[in-house]
Image (cartoon, rainbow, N blue to C red):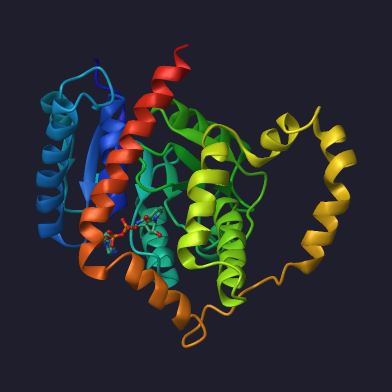
């Protein structure tokens, strides 16, 4: 594959490494930067290992071998080397407001006119750290879902200053690297997926605390019920298919939706000690010293699911 243009990654932790692997799979040259030089060295090792394992298991993305893909990723020691000639820079530093503000200020001072500056931020709206920048029109959020190599959804969220062209270009780049961008019309606290996720967690909390279900029961309800349903389609299409279209669904069920919704208790008290009974049940179900194995178990299932989805997409 002919090498594509350059991508810069700032912060080579879990998410920075994942982006590097996604971009090189699509043929981009990738430079990886971190405030800790040792972190870059370790990340390159880790990426190489992961690419080789994926290749061995037949799960490597892209047309090139693991070795060729790894050859397109380089570590660098300064932000200048990140932005120089880059079409797109992905910021992946820890989720701290002051840190994000500083990194975007530093990038803004040295970046060229045409480079997109994207943030992996999960929980803070872009206007909270992308304000007052010379290149504010080029700044945007591209929030991945962990693990991004196997879960393709990316929330692409503009700040009030992001230009429409940058939003479109970011969407195009995400599609090009095989992700599934969801483009927002404006910023919103929690974007979309965390809003939905927290609504679900709040209701789980109330079901457990009100003595309706155990933690295991709540997880089973999702795992064997709503989860498989939503694995292939969204909640709206689910409703459409559960009746003769949405109008028919609402004719049948809107009164139930209203009465159950009126009973929902809203935000739960996740502070300690209020959440202690839930924590205790979860610590029993998922012992803290077994989480590493459990993550491995999860990743294997996500990999198998991604393969199944690819296979069914081709039909
Ligand atoms: P991490 O802690 O694994 O990695 C962060 C890296 O940034 C570290 O290697 C650190 O040395 C480096 N760093 C710190 N300050 C820096 C600076 N000034 N310049 C350059 N590098 C610097 O964090 P992780 O999990 O990779 O998260 C990164 C971002 O991605 C966060 O905003 C997080 O919320 C977001 N995110 C995380 C997800 C997850 O599941 N871990 C999922 C989606 C988004």
Q: Position of residue 140 (x, y in %)?
A: 51, 48
Q: How many marks?
A: 0
Please report the residue visible at 16 percent of the width from the left and 26 percent of the height from the top: 55
Front residue of this view, candidates 204 and 39: 204
Please report the residue visible at 23 percent of the width from the left and 27 percent of the height from the top: 60
Query: What residue occupies the far top of the structure in this picture?
Result: 315
Is residue 149 in sight in this rendering?
no
Front residue of this view, candidates 193 and 141: 193
Q: Position of residue 162 (x, y in %)?
A: 58, 47
User: 6 left or right of 211?
Assistant: left
143 in relation to 95, above or below = above
Quadrant for the N terminus in the image: top left
User: 306 left or right of 290?
Assistant: right
Corner quadrant of residue 89: top left
Front residue of this view, candidates 199 and 219: 219
User: 250 left or right of 171?
Assistant: right
Please report the residue visible at 40 percent of the width from the left and 22 percent of the height from the top: 310
Query: What residue occupies the far bottom of the structure in this picture?
Result: 273
Corner quadrant of residue 226: top right
Is residue 128 in sight in this rendering?
yes
User: 284 left or right of 65?
Assistant: right
297 in relation to 303, above or below = below
Q: Position of residue 43 (x, y in %)?
A: 15, 49
Please report the residue visible at 46 percent of the width from the left and 75 percent of the height from the top: 278
Q: Position of residue 153 (x, y in %)?
A: 48, 39
Ligand 1 is found in which quarter of the picture?
A: bottom left
């Amino acid at each position: 594959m002919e090498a594509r243009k350059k991508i810069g990654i700032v912060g080579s932790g879990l998410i920075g490494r994942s982006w590097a692997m996604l971009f090189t799979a699509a043929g981009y040259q990738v430079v990886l930067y971190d405030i800790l030089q040792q972190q870059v060295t370790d990340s390159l090792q880790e990426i190489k290992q992961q690419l080789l394992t994926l290749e061995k298991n037949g799960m490597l993305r892209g047309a090139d071998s693991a070795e060729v893909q790894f050859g397109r990723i380089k570590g660098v020691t300064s932000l200048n080397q990140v932005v120089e000639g880059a079409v797109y820079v992905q910021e992946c530093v820890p989720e701290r407001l002051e840190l994000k503000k500083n990194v975007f200020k530093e990038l803004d001072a040295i970046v060229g006119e045409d480079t997109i500056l994207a943030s992996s931020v999960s929980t803070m709206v872009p206007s909270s750290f992308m304000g007052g920048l010379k290149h504010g029109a080029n700044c945007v959020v591209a929030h991945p879902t962990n693990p991004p190599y196997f879960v393709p959804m990316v929330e692409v969220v503009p700040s009030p200053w992001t230009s429409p062209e940058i939003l479109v270009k970011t969407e195009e780049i995400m599609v090009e690297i095989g992700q599934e961008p969801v483009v927002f019309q404006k910023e919103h606290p929690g974007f979309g997926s965390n809003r939905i996720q927290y609504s679900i967690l709040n209701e789980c909390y109330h079901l457990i605390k009100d003595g309706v279900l155990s933690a295991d029961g709540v997880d089973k309800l999702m795992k064997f019920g709503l989860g498989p349903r939503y694995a292939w389609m969204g909640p709206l299409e689910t409703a459409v298919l559960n009746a003769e279209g949405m109008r028919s669904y609402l004719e049948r069920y809107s009164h139930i939706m209203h009465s159950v919704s009126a009973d929902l208790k809203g935000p739960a008290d996740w502070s300690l000690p209020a959440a202690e009974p839930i924590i205790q049940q979860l610590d029993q179900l998922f012992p803290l010293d077994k989480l590493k194995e459990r993550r491995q178990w999860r990743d294997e299932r996500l990999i198998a699911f991604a393969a199944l989805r690819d296979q069914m997409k081709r039909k």
